[in-house]
Image: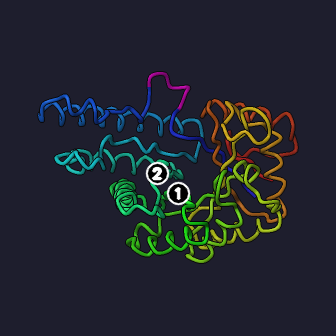
Amino acid sequence: MRIRLGYVAIALKLPKVTASSQFTYSRYKKLTEEEQINELKRVTRSNMEDLIKILSYNAENHIHFYRITSKLIPLATHPEVMNWEYEKYFKIDLNTIGALIRKHHMRVDTHPDHFNVLNSVREEVVEKTIKEFHLHNYWFEAMNYKEGKMVIHIGSGQGGKEKAIERFIKNFQRLPLAIKNRLIIENDDKLFTAKETLSLCEEIGVPMVLDIHHHVCNDSDEPIEDFLDRILYTWKGEAFPPKMHISSPKEGKLDKRHADYINPNNFIGLVEKCIPYGKDIDIMLEAKQKDLALYKLVEDLKRQKPEWMWVDPTTIEI
């Protein structure tokens, strides 16, 4: 059983490097048309160059698992930005990024922002969400990275959970197959429990991402051990092993805010639940200190679990 560690978006060990530089619509509106395009190109170019730096840094440090920011191309889906031909300007950059990912056998994914709600009762929100999915799918296509996945939540509970899940399934069926095949669904910390998310994933044939802290905050008294085997099984036939998320609460067990670092006891508890199944797992660390939290967790685990073997600096073998 191998466990790989990953982190989200920003490498704090790289000063002044971010693939998330923004160009707001309010600023966009104040510029001439020529200035708008030039600034969009400048910010996106900076993001692309910095993403290459981050991925190269990950490769040098044997970090095989990473989440690309959703802010890579600013204003790409904004309804009032009509002349932004990013596909024409940045196809080569995305292909270069994909070549780097493939060369180092990395696993990368994205997590479209929280305003994307596939089961919204508002059609304009659903349409914007689908547009965002097309954007992320375009990135992976331009990267020539067929394994790329997008993590989403079930979303709105308006009208009750049963109706909300019906809306999700109906709108899921509207998606092209290429996007359906990229979606993976995560349980949330307020509304849809891990068991409810699992049932949906089983019904529509989509892998489930278990977020263990979300489950702690929103478990409906359902022990994860009762259906962990089914969650793992949703990944059958996928190119990569099951993916899980872990964070530690900032204050108190049920605090939904992420702490700076991962409590090693939280991590060990999750792994020990998975050990009986003997399956490889990739665990994404959702901590404020990003890559620094990954390095600290490695050191904590080496002290607390000296019997665990390390295949490389970020991969455990048990």
Q: Is 15 colored magenta in this rendering? A: yes
- In the rendered image, residue 107, in percent from the top left (x then y), is placed at 54, 53
Secondary structure under tag 2 reads loop
- In the rendered image, residue 119, in percent from the top left (x then y), is placed at 48, 64
The prevailing secondary structure element of the residues shown in magenta is loop
Of labels 1 and 2, earlier in sequence is 2
Q: Quick check: 302 left or right of 315?
A: right
Q: Quick check: 101 left or right of 296?
A: left
Image quadrant in which the N terminus is located: bottom right
Specify the amino acid type for callout 1: Ile
Residue denoted by label 1? 152
Q: Quick check: 48 left or right of 180?
A: left
Q: Nearer the viewer, residue 1 or 281?
A: 281
Which residue is painted at 67% across and 30% down in the image? 260
Residue denoted by label 2? 112
- In the rendered image, residue 108, in percent from the top left (x then y), is placed at 51, 51
- In the rendered image, residue 79, in percent from the top left (x then y), is placed at 26, 50
Specify the amino acid type for callout 2: Pro
In the rendered image, is residue 197 in sight?
Answer: yes
User: Magenta residues?
Assistant: 11-16
